Amino acid sequence: MTTATQPPTLSVDDLRGSHARRRRELAIRLVFFAAAGLSVIISGLIVLSLIGEATNFITRVAPDALLDPAFFPQRELFGIPTLVVGTFIVALIGMAVATPLGLGAAVYLSEYAQPRVRKALKPVLEILAGIPSVVLGFFALTVISPQVVNPLCPGVTPLSNYAAAGLAVGILITPLVASVSEDAMYAVPRSLREASYGLGAKKRTTSIRIVVPAAVSGIVAALIIAFSRAIGETLIVAVASGATGGGRFTLDPCGPGQTMTAAMTSLAIGSDRPRGDSLAYPSLFFIGLLLFAMTLVLNIIGEAFVRRVRRAY
């Protein structure tokens, strides 16, 4: 008669591991916690510095100067609506370009492209997303404005204008929309596609009616990221929008204008560099704080929408 061998028993101390292993795990946790905490601290210090100088600006500036239909800080004219409207004109033009192109590319790569084609094109999209924005700014001045904008805009169009800057921003954010949206569509379970095909649906119907709604949370996230990127773009609008040192309120995309980031660039290092006890320097921090608040609100709204869509699907 053979006796069954008993498996070795494990104590609680064995499951916990050795003291050296626990110390290593504790050290790793502390390193990760320090990295996360340092990021929060740095972000908080940046916001506090913006708030301090922005408060100094608000307490000293005349309210009428903030609503003036022009932004010329050296003349004590701080028309914030001029900057906000200009920023949104450029961003919306960019999104009008990037949304159809990016989503179209995402649908093609996810649903129609062969695996080897997707494998070849996906890295190309990621490389295009890293194009230096100053290159696109120069491209907007030398190609987009004279060859694209001028024929579309009646009359004499300045070389630097909102439309050229917006089109260049659209080119910049198109790979971002395509890459993130394609990842969301590619992650949709294949069983949903097979069920649609089993009911007799065509690939086009499956793509539009099944895959896109199932991936809508990722698509919305891609559009929000792209819009935030367009709002915060600096070098393209500084080079191509055409309002160095200031600008007047305008809704004409064919004319030059000023944006929030371009104004900050001019105030910091450009031709409108502030000197002395002027309010131009603290206005830079106020614009930066306003830009931060706009981006934060946009991200919060987008996150709430994504959560609602995820619950629906």
Image (cartoon, rainbow, N blue to C red):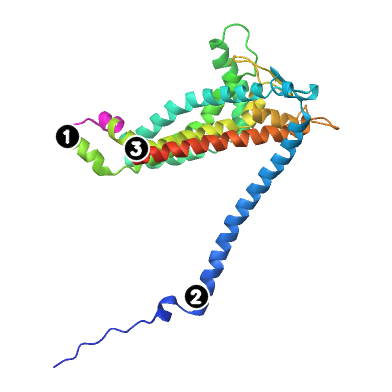
Looking at this view, name the residue that lies furthest to the right: 276
Q: Which mark is residue 110?
A: 3
- Rendered location of residue 275, percent (x, y): 84, 32
Please identify the quarter of the rendering in which residue 59 is found.
top right
The residue at 36%/41% (across/down) is 310
Answer few, some or many: residues within 10 Å of disc 2's Cα (few below 14, many 20 plus, some between 14 and 19). Answer: few
Q: In which quarter of the image is the C terminus?
A: top left
Would you say the magenta stretch is mainly helix, strand or loop?
A: helix
Query: Residue 271, located in which quarter of the rendered image?
Result: top right
Secondary structure of the residue carrying numbered label 3: helix
Toward the viewer: 186 or 108? 186
Q: Position of residue 274 (x, y in %)?
A: 80, 31
State left or right for residue 298 relative to residue 258. left
Residue picked out by circle 1:
199
Residue type at mark 2 is: Arg
Q: CB under 8 Å between callouts 1 and 2? A: no
The amino acid on which the numbered mark 3 sits, given as a three-letter code, is: Ser
Going 20% across and 35% down the picture, which residue do you hit? 197
Query: What's the residue type where badge 1 is placed?
Result: Leu
For mark 2, what is the residue? Answer: 21
Residue 31 seen in the figure: yes
Closer mark to the observer between disc 1 and disc 3: 1
The residue at the point 47 percent across, 36 percent down is 302
Q: Marks 2 and 3, how far apart in space?
A: 44 Å
Q: What stretch is highlighted in magenta?
A: 199-208
Q: How crowded is mark 1: few (under 14 residues within 10 Å), some or many (20 or more)?
A: few
